[in-house]
Amino acid sequence: MEINAIITAGGTSSRFGKTNKLLEKINGKEVIKYTVEKFDIPEIQRIIITANSSIIPILAGFFSANPKIKIVEGGSTRQQSVYNGLMAFCCDYVLIHDGARPMIMDEIIKNAVETVKTKKALTVMTKTIDTIKEVDEEGKIIRTIDRTRLYNTQTPQAFEYNLIKETHEKLKGQNFTDDAGMAEALGIDVYMIEGDYRNIKITTQNDIAIAQAYL
């Protein structure tokens, strides 16, 4: 049984600033190194990084000594980048994770690896703790949404390989922001496993300070 991990690193970091957030150093080590190292475990056979072309030479230098890691060029959208990663290697199951989530916990990864073997499609999630309100175009609150069944989606998301590959092929050319959403759109049952509130996605400069404390 072969399990691979796809790490998405194809974004331009437009909301972060002039530098690529994945190359930002936290406590002396780049964000992308923290993330990739989390998935370098015996249960995962290959790690495929789908990268923006501008940072491929840098990433190649970072990971040249590890034969387990393969770097491929990402696409213009996250959906295209993930599909490029899926096409790089066939396997039995695949975990898909944001390169900008370096605080992912070891136990969550291992839980995803074990659970996907029976559930076939899952995503890591945390219970929504804020009060959520729906607002119209003019900024007027329409209603307060019952949060008792609301969850925030994180990564990794994990799938049976053929299931998610066929999902991508059926929805080719669209622009979904997460793979679980693609599966849901085709009526596939997707399950949740408990995440961690520390597993934030680094998006702005302020997130670096939070990550520095956690890491």
Image (cartoon, rainbow, N blue to C red):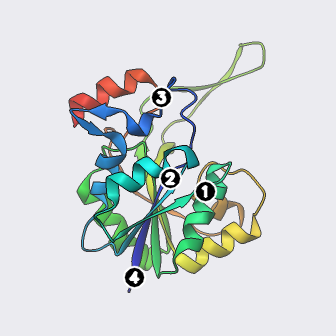
Is 83 placed above or below 42 here?
above
Q: Amino acid at mark 2?
A: Thr
Quarter of image, res 117: bottom left
Quarter of image, res 63: bottom left
- Cα gap from disc 4 to disc 1, whole angstroms: 21 Å
User: Judging from the image, what secondary structure is the residue with disc 1 in?
Assistant: helix
Q: Which residue is mark 1?
A: 81
- The residue nearer to you, when weighing 59 against 16, is 59
Q: Which residue is mark 2?
A: 8
The answer to whether residue 86 is seen in the rendering is yes
Sort mark 2 into few (<14), some (14-19) or many (20+) by Cα contacts within 10 Å.
many
Q: Earlier in the sequence, mark 1 or mark 2?
A: 2
Q: Which residue is mark 3?
A: 19
Q: Earlier in the sequence, mark 4 or mark 2?
A: 4
Q: Which residue is mark 4?
A: 2
Quick check: 201 left or right of 79? left
Q: Amino acid at mark 1?
A: Ser
Q: Earlier in the sequence, mark 3 or mark 1?
A: 3
The answer to whether residue 201 is seen in the rendering is no
- The residue nearer to you, when weighing 198 against 206, is 206
Quick check: 14 left or right of 70? right
Tell me whether the residue at label 3 lies in contact with that at label 4, contact meaning CB atoms closer than 8 angstroms.
no
Quick check: 66 left or right of 155? left
Residue 129 placement (x, y as % from top left): 41, 32
User: Judging from the image, what secondary structure is the residue with disc 4 in?
Assistant: loop
- Cα gap from disc 2 to disc 3, whole angstroms: 17 Å
- Cα gap from disc 4 to disc 2, whole angstroms: 20 Å
Q: Earlier in the sequence, mark 2 or mark 3?
A: 2
**Which of the labelled discs sits on residue 209, or is there none?**
none
- The residue nearer to you, when weighing 40 against 122, is 40
Residue 86 placement (x, y as % from top left): 56, 70
